[in-house]
């Protein structure tokens, strides 16, 4: 049976009675690879993310994490199952900043696309730059920025799309360990100032536990949810915090078991 | 300023050395000036006929500039159509290659029949000779735009037009100019072909016409003087286009960050 429900923009903001901003029920999705064989990316995945919470999805490479995000953003349709979610925007792993635009214009891209005049889009972007510690970088071109700075600009661009759900696909995957930790702290701070519902996909279990309210562990392909952990530690969380370490061990254990099956 | 001087000096020295060797060869071997005039005769002719050469030059320069602009506009529009619309790519792209094999003399008559003896048929000839590199470089640049980039624009709710406007057009513009730079290499000789294959009314018909009539009148050194003007003109146009390309895409000439 093919069922899919997708709330539209207008409805999403009205339906405050709904507890979950993102809700997937028994979602399966297969695709054809280059050789024409069918690959089952996701099998019967059920997930929920409460409004304003951070849901992290961890799993080994190729377990359908990116497919999951594209389903939530409406870039793909599920083969079966139901997806109900508020309008979502994708932040891909690569920053994909346009080289011909300044950092500010890149960040304000969604506003320009929505028809906001350039000057007004810049003003709104600049105030967010100020708020999130990017002041002074407005006029820099992407190639003048470090990898971490570019991810920040890409994140602001995602924020300014105005959608209530942010889907982050391995946002810090290409960064070195030090920058990565800085970025995790920055993201925690940014979400305090600009609260959104976040679905964060990562292969880094520690990152998931440091950043998220709930962590869903996916098995290798076809991806299914093999464990869900709730992290109640107050933020900001240190990676050496005892609870973080315990939860990490638990998640790693589950991943190892799911692989052995 | 010093960098500009360093750019100008080597080609200037090479040119002077070449002229010197040529002068020595003609003087020492006693070459017939009707066959190959000496550089000093060429420059003397240039001095004596400055007014004539200038009048003809303005005509040829106009033809090259407008003809190349026409090629740039037409080639760019065609590249965008080819990129956006697959049937267009299938139907038109092979013919653009074929069009480059057409000898201008074959189509000169209908061009003059339709548009007379003015500048327009010449612009068509130059554009026909020049548009192809513009189409190829622009189509390639449009195809080279990162598909993930376009997907990102789609996730930000960009329409097809907006994806083109923000994601593809800025990449295609410098590529089209780069194509025009290649086209310029054949554009000046294209003007020569245009002038000699279509008739012109009026006192001056351009440097191409000047050269052919000088050669038939055994005014070889004047033909060389006119050729020297074309030579310098081509170089100037090339640098003008290079500067325009740099102004249009400042990001492409600066060290890029790592591209993954």
Image (spheres, coloured by chain):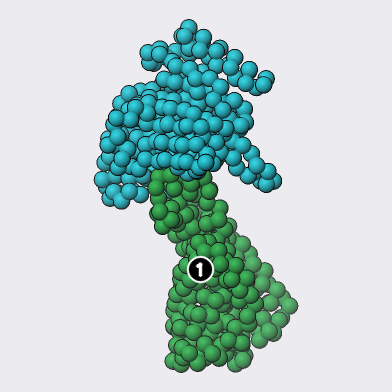
- The residue that appears at 69% across and 46% down in the rendered structure is A35
* Residue B28 lies in quadrant: bottom right
| Quadrant location of the C terminus of chain A in the rendered image | top right
- The residue that appears at 44% across and 92% down in the rendered structure is B202
Q: Is residue B52 left or right of residue A257?
A: left
User: Looking at the picture, does residue A244 appear above or below residue A25?
Assistant: above
- The residue that appears at 59% across and 80% down in the rendered structure is B224
User: Looking at the picture, does residue B76 appear above or below residue A106?
Assistant: below
- The residue that appears at 41% across and 32% down in the rendered structure is A22
Residue B174 in sight from this viewpoint: no
Q: Which chain's residue wears label 1?
A: B
Between B224 and A7, the residue placed more toward the observer is: A7
User: Looking at the picture, does residue B217 appear above or below residue B148?
Assistant: below
Between B248 and B88, the residue placed more toward the observer is: B88
Determine the secondary structure under disc 1.
helix
Mark 1, Cα crowd under 10 Å, few <14 / some 14-19 / many 20+, is many
* Residue A104 lies in quadrant: top left
Q: Which residue is mark 1?
A: B78
Q: Position of residue A71 (x, y in %)?
A: 48, 39
The tint chain A carries is cyan
* Residue B185 lies in quadrant: bottom right
């Amino acid at each position: 049976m093919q069922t899919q429900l997708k709330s539209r923009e207008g409805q999403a903001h009205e339906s405050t009675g709904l507890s979950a901003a993102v809700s997937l029920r028994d979602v399966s999705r297969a695709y054809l690879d280059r050789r024409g064989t069918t690959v089952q990316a996701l099998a019967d995945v059920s997930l929920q993310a409460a409004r304003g919470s951070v849901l992290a999805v961890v799993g080994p490479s190729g377990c359908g994490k990116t497919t999951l995000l594209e389903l939530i953003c409406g870039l793909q349709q599920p083969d079966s199952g139901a997806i109900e979610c508020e309008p979502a925007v994708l932040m891909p792993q690569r920053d994909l900043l346009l080289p011909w635009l300044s950092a500010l214009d890149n960040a304000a891209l969604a506003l320009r696309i929505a028809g906001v005049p350039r000057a007004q889009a810049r003003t709104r972007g600049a105030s967010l730059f100020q708020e999130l510690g990017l002041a002074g970088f407005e006029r820099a071109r992407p190639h003048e920025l470090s990898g971490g700075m570019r991810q920040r600009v890409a994140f602001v661009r995602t924020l300014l799309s105005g959608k209530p759900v942010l889907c982050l696909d391995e946002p810090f995957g290409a960064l070195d360990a030090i920058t990565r930790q800085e970025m995790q702290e920055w993201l925690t701070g940014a979400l305090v100032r600009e609260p959104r519902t976040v679905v964060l996909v990562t292969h880094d279990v520690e990152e998931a536990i440091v950043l998220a309210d709930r962590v869903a562990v996916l098995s290798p392909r076809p991806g299914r949810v093999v464990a869900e952990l709730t992290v109640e530690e107050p933020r900001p969380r240190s990676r050496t915090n005892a609870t973080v370490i315990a939860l990490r061990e638990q998640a790693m254990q589950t991943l190892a078991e799911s692989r052995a099956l | 300023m010093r960098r500009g001087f360093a750019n100008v000096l080597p080609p200037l020295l090479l040119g002077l050395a070449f002229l010197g060797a040529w002068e020595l060869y003609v003087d020492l071997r006693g070459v017939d000036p009707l066959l190959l005039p000496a550089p000093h005769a060429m420059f003397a002719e240039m001095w004596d006929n400055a007014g004539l050469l200038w009048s003809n030059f303005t005509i040829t320069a106009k033809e090259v500039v407008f003809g190349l602009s026409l090629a740039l506009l037409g080639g760019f529009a065609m590249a965008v159509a080819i990129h956006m619309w697959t049937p267009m790519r299938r139907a038109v792209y092979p013919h653009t290659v074929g069009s480059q094999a057409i000898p201008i003399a074959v189509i000169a008559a209908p061009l003059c029949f339709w548009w007379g003896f003015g500048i327009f048929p010449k612009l068509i000839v130059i554009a026909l000779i020049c548009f192809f590199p513009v189409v190829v470089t622009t189509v390639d640049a449009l195809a080279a735009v990162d598909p993930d980039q376009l997907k990102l624009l789609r996730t930000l709710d960009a329409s097809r037009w907006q994806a083109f406007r923000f994601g593809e057009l800025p990449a295609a513009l410098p590529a089209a100019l780069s194509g025009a730079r290649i086209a310029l290499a054949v554009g000046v000789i294209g003007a020569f072909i245009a002038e000699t294959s279509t008739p012109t009314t009026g006192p001056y018909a351009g440097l191409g016409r000047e050269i052919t009539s000088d050669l038939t009148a055994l005014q070889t050194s004047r033909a060389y003087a006119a050729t020297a003007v074309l030579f310098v003109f081509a170089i100037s146009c090339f640098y003008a286009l290079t500067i325009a390309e740099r102004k249009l895409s400042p990001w492409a000439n600066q060290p890029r960050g790592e591209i993954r």
